[in-house]
Amino acid sequence: MRKTENAAPVVVIGAGMAGARLAARVPGVTVVGEERHAPYNRVLLADVLAGRYAPEVVALPAVEVRRGVRAVRIDRADRLVHCDDGSVLHYGRLVLATGSNPVLPPLRGLGDTLPDGVHPFRTLDDALALRAAVRPGVRAVVIGGGLLGVSAARALAECGARVVLAQQGEHLMERQLDPEAAALLRVHLEALGVEVHTECRVRGLRRTGGTTGTAGAVRAVQLADGYELAADLTVLACGVRPRTGLARAAGLEVRRGIVVDDELRTSDPYIHALGDCAEHRSTLYGLAGPALEQADVLAESLAGRPARYEGTRALTRLTLRSPSAESFNSPGPLEALDLAAFGEARPRPGDDVIRLADATRGAYRTVVVRDGRLAGGVLLGDLGAVGSLARTWQDDEPLPAALSLLHLLTDDGGH
């Protein structure tokens, strides 16, 4: 017999930032998490890799989690979750916060099981494994020049590794930065000792000869032009893919992610999804900010209060600290580089673009104005204006006609 909606508790599958945030706000939630660690702040993984923070420092406020348990099947008819430890959980509402997996590029020499010397960079265990493997002078190749790859390269350089960053696209962090800002970011990374290759396609991995039945460890990254990059460590930072297998097997609507409406409901009204695995209005965010906002909205909804999620206008921030003076390849004292990007930094025909650059200070600011509204922008170096710019962009209100566009880039945002 089908259970009534409130006959069983809220069950959350996934103990990442989204699942933990929801559990902290909704009493009596049961959380199932695959990882052995307590929930932690994924944004700080590069700082764990660099040795700046211990694992306990990045832990989130305590919530009770059934750790090391994986949900393997959802029975929608009887509202049951079957787990790999043999347990079965009843739910009145089920929340899928299954997150995402790192993308494994189609490289020769890379199978379903990662060979020795090759590391993803997505979880706390990944960061700790890399931390244990890196030492001064180690040759590390990071494949992928997005936000994750740049963060990993900086952290490895801080550990004293000799780092090469291989990016297939034309410039670093293509999703967030325009070419000018990416060029400044590249200069900063190179000053930290990171060798940057853009428009660089990786073809495969070369392994050492293994013993019988083994393939050996990876010792070089092979490029499409035949050149090889020697590698004691290879880090895969090629993006992420939503984890949708559980939802798909349960018959829920899945496109690129698990499709949800403005109340974070899936195609089954008793099942919700949020965070990296959720696709809302055809958008996959893959960022912490939207995941936390979705969790807050869903917490209100589960408490019986009206709440709707209408999307997040996400701001990306990154600080590239300098290696310590004791680092193997430190070129000496360097200023940290602060970066912020929001909205669409690439102008369309008819947009107004305003730029301010100070080469001596390594500062760069640009904003794009479209139809009288702030469409996006990038700031490097001095982030004094980022707060007012972000508020102007998030409010999505028409800019005052009397406001000089140049004032958008001043420290007070023109106010």
Image (tube, rainbow, N blue to C red):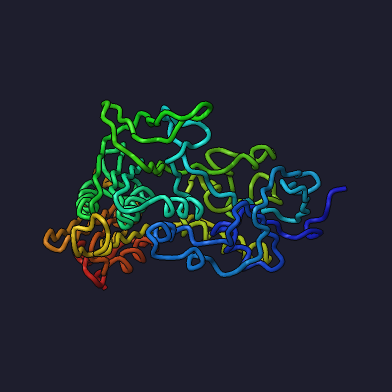
Tell me: 202 left or right of 23: left
Residue 352 appears anywhere in the view: no
Q: Which residue lies at the image location 27% right of the left edge and 59% below the top edge?
A: 327
Q: Which residue lies at the image location 26% right of the left edge and 26% below the top edge?
A: 225
Asked where in the image residue 76 lies, by quadrant, the reply is: top right
Tell me: 95 left or right of 141: right
Query: How far across and down, in percent of the image, does residue 285 sit?
Result: 47, 50
Query: How far across and down, in percent of the image, does residue 321 sit?
Result: 29, 62
Residue 119 appears anywhere in the view: yes
Q: Is residue 137 above or below residue 169?
A: below
Q: Residue furthest left?
A: 360
Q: Nearer the viewer, residue 172 or 138?
A: 138
Query: How far across and down, in percent of the image, does residue 308 sit?
Result: 57, 59
Q: Nearer the viewer, residue 254 or 222?
A: 222
Q: Is residue 361 above or below residue 245?
A: below
Assign the C terminus to one quadrant of the image. bottom left
Q: Which residue lies at the image location 59% right of the left edge and 53% below the top edge?
A: 35
Q: Which residue lies at the image location 55% right of the left edge and 47% below the top edge?
A: 277
Tell me: 236 left or right of 39: left
Q: Residue furthest right?
A: 1
Query: How far across and down, in percent of the image, does residue 288 sit?
Result: 47, 57
Q: Residue furthest front?
A: 211
Task: Count how many numbered circles sit on residues in the image.
Answer: 0
